[in-house]
Image: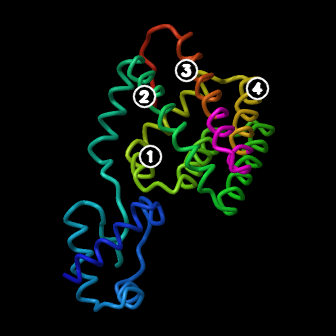
Amino acid sequence: MVSERVADRILASIASGEWGPGHRLPGERRLAEEMGVSRVSVRAALQGLKTQGLLDAVQGGGTRVIASSAAMDPGMRELVRVNCENLNDLAEIRAILETWAVVRAALNRSDDDIAELERIMSATEADIAAGRHKTENDMRFHLAIAKASRSGIYLHIVAVIRGVLREMLEFHRYRLFPSRTDDGVILAQHRAIVDGIRARDPAAAEAAMRAHLGWVLDRYAEQPARRPDVGGS
């Protein structure tokens, strides 16, 4: 069926990372023109993907890519709130995933990706110098690497854990690594990661990310067993 072929093309754009979580799709008319099919076929394809939980209607009209985070993220956040070991487990899993992602980023990144990472680095330096909030730039940094990986699957994984990832970074920046010395270490580690991605050197990027997240895990190991209070009480 034509609508199934249209759905497959939309899925290919999602799977490649071209259309990541939250991305608003072109309108039905534009999709129909680009694919050389009728709007009826496009509408049927979109409805099928909505039924599968991959797309959602946008208020006011249109369609966007979604991630199935509504059920997972709150449960995961509760797990890390009540037990610090669960937060440590998540940090270990994140280290595995992000080491994989940075290799992909080094292989697939665009000039725009490097420009975005450089903007984030500059903002991070400025905020550290001014003593401003630090977590937002950390979040932007890791999301930019996810985008540069060009992996639709990885982008959706990040979307699922985005809420708890933000709270984890809050815990890191204000509880685990609160000092100016820590700020400098993290900045240097992020710079090494960016340099590896820019050079299209997957080995260097992987080594830099492994060193960064290994340093994080070492700090976890030094913490006494306790409730982490991620996200507040």
> Which amino acid type corresponds to the residue marked 2 in the rendered image?
Leu
The residue under label 3 is 217
Q: Tell me if 94 is positioned left or right of 29 in this view.
A: right
Q: Tell me if 145 is positioned left or right of 180 in this view.
A: left
In space, the residues marked 3 and 2 are separated at their CA atoms by 10 Å
Which residue is rendered at x = 62% and y = 36% of the image? 206
Return the disc, 3 or 2, that comes first in the chain's sequence: 2
Tag 3's secondary structure?
helix
Image quadrant in which you'd find residue 28: bottom left
Few, some or many residues within 10 Å of mark 3 (<14, 14–19, 20+): some
Where in the figure is residue 192, as x and y percent of width and height?
73, 38
In space, the residues marked 1 and 2 are separated at their CA atoms by 12 Å
Return the disc, 1 or 3, that comes first in the chain's sequence: 1
Chief SS of the magenta region: helix
Q: Which mark is residue 180?
A: 4
The residue under label 2 is 90
Q: Nearer the viewer, residue 15 or 157?
A: 15
Q: Which mark's residue is nearer the viewer, 2 or 4?
A: 2
27 inside magenta stretch: no
